[in-house]
Image: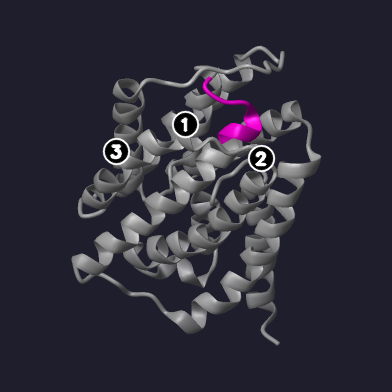
Amino acid sequence: MDLGLVAICFALLVVASLYSSVGHGGASGYLAVLSLTTYGAMEAAWLKQHAWCLNLVVAGIAFWHFHRAGHHASRLTIPFIVASVPLAMFAGFLRVEGVVYDLLLSICLVLAAWRLYAVSSEEKSVVGMPDWNVAMPTGGAIGFASGLVGIGGGVLLSPILLLKEWATPKGAAATAAIFVWANSLAALGGAVLSNQMVLEFETLLPFICAVLIGGFIGSRYGADVAPQQMVRRILVVVLIVASAKRLFELI
């Protein structure tokens, strides 16, 4: 048995567990893990496409758990996805230099973590729904940013949903999960349309098995067990860890 592969799969399992507990797919975490291994020498398209595939698995499981637990509101989700998917696919055709990519994403994640941490810890039972003329531009902007930097967008959408009081932490996780799934699928669709697919299914299979387990454990905990405030705190940790990883790469 290849111990290196076992270590990679275990790391991916841990990442999937953490991210799925707050409705995220974990692309930034998967890219971090793979970049620290021999797979780090692969081209950016290879890394992103494999991370997007793992996103589909984990975000799909997370959405199923949060939806089954009654935390999903389609009226909240639809306007964000309608605008995000086409722009995520379009942005997937564009290229961003590595340093610019890491810097922009790091800034976004740090600001999101700071704002989220500053939000009152009081849980509100009643939340408002955004108007379409507000939700669509927001979703479109996040979708474009997601396609540009190669993530699913959950780390950008969740803080906005909570800061604007459009959703509870678990409601935000449910919406973020399906948002990530849709954007990841759109990004892969863009790769197909532009003839840039470089997936290696033999390599992908053990990774999928690992995140399948991690995604199930994490989303089950986040949807049914964790208190609302605990989900918020986990999300803050996820944002800080992701931003620290990006900033470390710039040093």
Task: Please say whether residue 239 is visible from this viewpoint.
Answer: no
Q: CA distance from mark 2 to mark 3?
A: 24 Å
- Between label 2 and label 3, give the one nearer the viewer: 2
Are dots 2 and 1 in contact, CB under 8 Å? no
Q: Residue 45: image x %, image y %?
A: 32, 64
Would residue 51 be found to the left or right of residue 23 on screen? left
Cβ–Cβ under 8 Å for marks 1 and 3: no
Q: Please identify, in this view, whether the residue under mark 1 or under mark 3 is nearer the observer.
A: 1
Q: Position of residue 175 (x, y in %)?
A: 52, 39
Is residue 203 found left or right of 48 in the rendered image?
right
The structure residue drawn at horizontal position 62% and vertical position 46%, both measured from the top left corner, is 67
Q: Which residue is mark 1?
A: 76
Q: Quadrant of residue 205?
A: bottom right
Q: How far apart are the two marked residues, 1 and 3, measured between alpha carbons?
A: 13 Å
| Residue that carries the numbered disc 2 in the rendered image | 70
Instruction: Report the residue marked by disc 3.
Output: 83
Quadrant containing the N terminus is bottom right
Q: Amino acid at mark 2?
A: Gly
Residue at image position (37%, 20%) is 131
Residue 45 tag number: none
> Toward which corner of the image does residue 240 lie, by quadrant?
top right
Residue occupying the point 53% across, 57% down: 30
Sequence-first tag of 2 and 1: 2
Q: CA distance from mark 2 to mark 1?
A: 14 Å
Which residues lie in the magenta part? 166-172
x and y percentages locating residue 190 in the rendered image: 25, 60
